[in-house]
Image: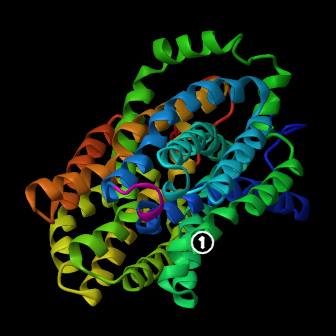
Amino acid sequence: MSNGEFATPKTETVEGRKTIRRAIGASAIGNATEWFDYGVYAVAVTYITANFFPGGTVWALATFAISFLVRPLGGLVWGPLGDRLGRKAILALTIILMSGATFAIGLLPTFDAIGWWAPALLIFLRMLQGFSTGGEYGGAATFMAEYSPDKKRGFFGSFLEFGTLFGFVLGTAVVLFLQLILSDEAMFDWGWRIPFLLAGPMGLIGLYLRSKVEDTPVFRELEEEGKEEESPTTELRDLVRKYWRPLLSMAGLVIALNVTNYTLLAYMPTYLETQIGLSQDGSLALILIGELAMMAVIPFAGRLSDRIGRKPLWLTSMAGLFIAAIPLYLLMGTGFAGALVGFAVLGLLYVLQLSTISATFPAMFPTHVRYAGFAITYNLATSVFGGTAPLINEALIDTTGDLLIPAYYMMGACLVGIVALYFVPETARASIRGTEIPRQKPGD
């Protein structure tokens, strides 16, 4: 069947390349919209604090973290639905909710206008974002992996993470541009709203692109053969009973991935400004340069994983971060130049994980439980260890006075990931069709 009606698009044909490009665009734009919001919130935390949290920065970081508490619920709801109704239908709903909530943040009245209702409404919208993200990321990665040819899944899947960094870069660039052209008074008054309002048209573009692509060939094949799970309840029971090993090993990898991710990308602006003493413009410019360097490397790292496997890249990344974290954080404390080099090197090591997410995680589960297995595991581990990273880092630094806390946290997470990696099978070039756990066959 895989060579017939539901065959994966072939890169050797013009129509096949067009189909894959549409799938990449449909997947990546939603991811970019999601991380645009997280990027904007991370770099605009000073303005969020001033307008919504008179108690200080820690409350703004806690609100950043609180959206992650709802992500597992989103995974529990959207994941099983995505395995029964299809990837495309759920991705259309999640991008509407996600971009709509981000847009609404740009319209919120401030604390001075309505008192404690302002942070309450902000928290509600952040939770709505978290709920929608619980289905968005796992679905987009699954969609991309199932559209990619087996031998190039690392390369094509890396463009989903290109979208991740593009969202961060765009959010950082927009805030930096506004800071350069507007006065401080204007930024604190109304300028901070503009980046959030941009999420509205971004979401509409993403919805349009997703409406132009069919559901994945892998899912349509499963649907044609009638092998979907009977109900969401049955699927959740089967996940825990039959697939607890990949659930646990993936959780370990996600801890390493997202502690690094949110420490480097979400917490770094606050760290550089409040702990290192860089200016707002300087810290944003530094992060922008580092993220652009990471974007340039992502497709090459994805292609490399198709050649040598996913596991060597993950091991190199986690071992490198463990060894280099303390020296590079010490280097960042020396000033702008040292911070730029330290952040860039940490980011390039992290890219070896980031670039292979869409190739690694969906391939850990068979088709009929793939969306749910990915979404639930990823979001549960992320909610506990990833989204809380900025808050934990800030609180521990304030308590201990030790500016190396982020390095220690990343090192501990990478140790967890290295242990988990031992139990993960290599799936480079392996087929991800069918109801068996994908594995690389001898000779692949």
For the question of whether residue 90 can be seen, the reply is: yes
* Residue at 57% in and 82% down: 178
Q: Mark 1 points at which residue?
A: 190
Q: Position of residue 388 (x, y in %)?
A: 35, 46
Write the start and end of the magenta stretch as one range.
50-54
Q: Where is residue 160 in the image (x, y as percent from the top left)?
A: 62, 57
| Residue closer to the observer: 78 or 141 | 78
Q: How many marks?
A: 1
Q: In which quarter of the image is residue 276?
A: bottom left
Q: How crowded is mark 1: few (under 14 residues within 10 Å), some or many (20 or more)?
A: few
Q: Which amino acid does label 1 sit on?
A: Trp
For the question of whether residue 152 can be seen, the reply is: no
* Residue at 50% in and 34% down: 70
Q: Is residue 284 magenta?
A: no
Q: Where is residue 107 in the image (x, y as percent from the top left)?
A: 66, 58
- Horizontal side, residue 379 vs residue 420: left or right: right
* Quadrant of the drawing holding the N terminus: top right
- Horizontal side, residue 152 vs residue 65: left or right: right
Q: From this view, report whether residue 377 is shown above or below residue 58.
A: above
Q: Position of residue 48 (x, y in %)?
A: 46, 61
* Residue at 21% in and 54% down: 411
Q: Quadrant of residue 406?
A: bottom left
* Residue at 40% in and 43% down: 254
Q: In which quarter of the image is residue 196?
A: bottom right
Colour mode? rainbow
| Residue closer to the observer: 246 or 274 | 274
Q: Main secondary structure of the magenta part?
A: helix
Q: From this view, report whether residue 136 is shown above or below residue 364.
A: below
Q: From this view, report whether residue 297 is shown above or below residue 110.
A: below
- Horizontal side, residue 122 vs residue 425: left or right: right
Callout 1 secondary element: helix
